[in-house]
Image (tube, rainbow, N blue to C red):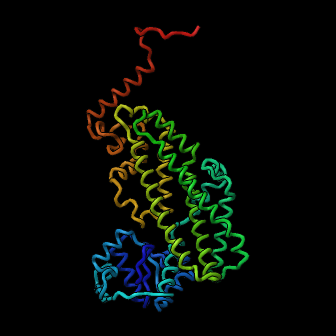
Amino acid sequence: MVVEPEGVLVAGDPTAVEGYLAKLRFDAVSAVEVAGIDSQAVAGTAALASGLAAVGAQHGTFVRLAPDSVELMRKFHVLPGQPGFNRMTVVDTAGKFRGQMQWQKASLAGTRALSIQLAMTTLALQTAIAETTTAVERVEGKVDQVLNLAKASMTGDVLGHHQALHRAVRTLDESGQLPSADWDSLAPLGPGLEVVVERLRAHIRKSIDGFDASKPVQDRASYLQKVVEDNRLGESLELLVIAEDSLYLWQRLRIERVKQTEPEHLELVVATARKMLAEHLAVDGELLLRGRAELARYAAIKPLEIVRWMSSAQLKRDVIQLRHDLDSFATARRSQVQGWQDHEDPSVGDALAELGTRFKSIGETALALGSRGLDAGAAGLGFLGKQFTRVAEAREASKRTPDPEAAPAPRDE
């Protein structure tokens, strides 16, 4: 096994590898993604073959693990950690003994070490984005508008570039060759893709910065509608996924080109790609968690806002849509396997999980809207919660009914 920041390469006898993968699945549960088994496209790549060749194996799998899971498994000797022999008993999901495994720390130097790093980086680039089909369908016909909002309209046809890069990488995976003509036509795209990624992130971050939970509910509703309809926050997140996937595809082609024509620079190029992946993961994780936290606070219902909140169908749609957009981004960026939400404040997840069910309860009592979705004061207080509702209704009615004793409003002559 080779353990790198991007994942784990498990290689060796097929039976032993399968037994060990079962152990990983059993211990890590949903924190593990086995790319070589769950995705046939990864299993046949030249990158995996080169990594296996570096350790003298014929069979192997690339595994992605959440960082916390890696440390925990090292602690309990499920993954190699400290120098010396580690021993582990392998059992199946029924707890039945299947054999023992052991390993000893060994150094991989020179070309073997570079081959491993190349393989791991390439596989990490290939599996960084789960899928883009949904994102492409969502943004078709809206790309130019989103790019204008993000001030990245000069970058050209993002969807067309993504398709061209995908075709070139598929040819590379199938044939192991990257014709010069293909690379020459795609080489200029790299800098432009980096611009798109950074400007889309800036646009998304600016939209999230505008959430102000202290404002009255009507102002929050107005801004949320602007974010969803005018700022196209959901489409911006989807286009960011496509642009990042395009950049990772381009990096794979760049690595292959350098490998073929300038092997003396290969180590530097691989290191650059690894650094970029790590930076993207950190920034996207922060972007997702911040978006989730701000939406949870923004959508919280204060006791005296219940009637107004329930009366806005547009607001309900916008809140649920934005939650869905954030969930879709998290899925595309494999947030679960990255462990992004493992340390998130549980109240954020509770509030977001409650949004959909709360808004389906329209027409019922305020208490039925879900205690976790309400601010402290009306949440789960029974009779007192109903009293809050009556007070809110009375205030709304008083605003609609003029006070006969009030002084008349001045008129413009």
Q: Position of residue 113 (x, y in %)?
A: 47, 84
Q: Is residue 388 above or below residue 130?
A: above
Q: Indicate whether 391 appears above or below 144.
A: above
Residue 338, compared with residue 396, is above or below; it is: below
Residue depicted at x 51% and y 89% = 53
Residue at the spot x=46%, y=33% of the render?
218
Q: Quadrant of the C terminus?
A: top right
Residue 387 location in percent, x, y? Answer: 29, 29
The quarter holding residue 212 reads: top left
Q: Residue at x 58, y 79 (%)?
A: 265
Res 379 seen here: yes
Residue extending furthest toward the right: 181
Residue 306: x and y, percent?
38, 34
Q: How many marks?
A: 0
Q: Which image quarter is the N terminus in?
A: bottom left
Furthest residue in direction front, as rendered: 264
- Between residues 226 and 116, which one lies in front from this camera angle? 116
Is residue 365 visible in this depiction of the protein? no
Q: Nearer the viewer, residue 328 or 397?
A: 328
Position of 29 relative to 154 (above/below): below
Residue 232: % across, % down: 57, 47
Q: Residue at x 41, y 25 (%)?
A: 396
Residue nearest the observer in this picture, 75 or 93: 75
